[in-house]
Image (tube, rainbow, N blue to C red):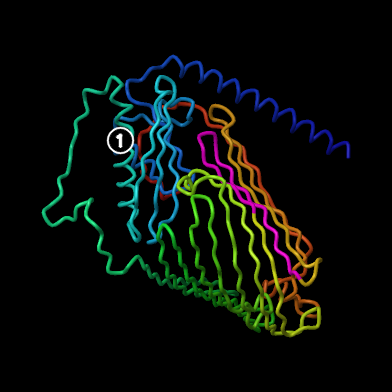
Amino acid sequence: MPLMLRSARLFAARFAALLTLVFAVGSSATAQDSTATPSRLRVFLDCPTGGCDRNFLVTELPFALFTLDRLDADVHVLVTGLGTGAGGTEYTIGFLGRRRYAARSDTLVAFVAPNSSEDMRRRELARVMQLGLVPFAMRSSEAARFAVRYTAPTDDAPSVLSSVNDPWNFWVYRARVNGSANAESRSSNYQVNPSIDVTRVTEIWKYTFHAQSEYRANSFKLSDGSERTFILRSVDVNSRLVKSISDHWSVGTRVSGGLSEFRNQDAYGAVDVSAEYNVFPWREATSRQMIALVAVGARRYNYAEETVFGRLSETRPVARAIVAGESRLAWGTVDASLRYFRFLHNNDAYNLSFNGRATFRISRGLSLELRGEAAKVNDQLYLPRGDATDDEVLTRQRALATSYRYGGSVGLSFTFGSIYNTIVNPRLDELGG
């Protein structure tokens, strides 16, 4: 025990010394950076939802000097995105002025069509970012280097003002088949995941249909030369219809069904009706949401094996409630939800869960990321009678009884050094570290 205490004290002393050095270096860099006044517009790229190719943007926007921290930037570019009804992405790009541009801000929108290549996505983002940054750059010493270029539409190109004649009437169909496999001398596994999606999304109505299946097989060769194979199957089909009532209210209904060998379910079906309220207007959904949702319905289960409650089938009324929020702003990102599910026939059969993620920019170069989830589990009506075998436990062939689940992570990052080095040089990157 004394040895452990000495080790802990030594670790704490070294960690404190490291933090002192880090903040000293950061303060020195801050003082040095504040005296430097580059001619180019300093831009901080913030893309929490992904899809931004930073190296490409650095190359395509040569008038901008990309910084590593928002406190060093003249413009904070915040990019958030949500999926569109056709399967593409709508990006909302906020241009937040800082320093001498603090009184200036703007917001533009970029649409990326479904099945667009990564190159098409990054070029569209670069085009819109360039348009949004020009008003800031025109007030810098680089203003004389800018010119306007306009690509006129061809004669057969449809006019933006003309009405759209959609032969599909907003219906979108998508089919996928994913498969994977790997093998070693004594083990192998493969899985196949086909799926199909059908959607029709308008401002007032949203209809979605999703069906997917999974087939997974794991084989092991034991020391006695025998071979064991474990197979797991699942099917899930669900359909949802939602109507927008106002900028804040929505109502909907859902029907679903399928099977799950993992959950001892030969077949299951569900139906519910729900209502949802968003504190913020839905047009701001790419940057912030705060919703409250309630739903009531019923579940029907047919079990492969008799459950711990002595049933081979049952139909139960259920209720759900969800409170969830998401915010993507200049200081960081917060995403959290609290979910409650309950079988109405039994007050003790419920599930209460929380999950959250937060990223905070504490100071220049210093960021903190927190993730956590916890659940009180008391709704496993599907558990089969009897104990699971060692094979079932080790290969995750069936759900195991538990009264809780939890997990979490914490991360701290600090970046210091040159804030102006935006040179792109990817040579030998594929070799790794």
Camera-side residue of 250 and 371:
250
Report the side of 42 relative to 27 (left or right): left
At horizontal 64% and vertical 83% (from top left) the residue drawn is: 266
SS state under label 1: loop
| Viewer-closest of 401 and 247 | 247
> In the visual, does 163 lie left or right of 232?
left
Q: Residue at x 30, y 22 (%)?
A: 139
Q: Amino acid at mark 1?
A: Leu
- Disc 1 marks which residue? 61
Q: Position of residue 254 (x, y in %)?
A: 56, 70
Queried whether the magenta region covers residue 331, the answer comes back as: yes
Q: Is residue 139 above or below residue 164?
A: above
Residue 233, how many percent across, how many down?
A: 59, 79
The extreme front residue here reads 245
Please give the range of residues in magenta. 323-344
> What secondary structure is the magenta-colored segment mainly?
strand
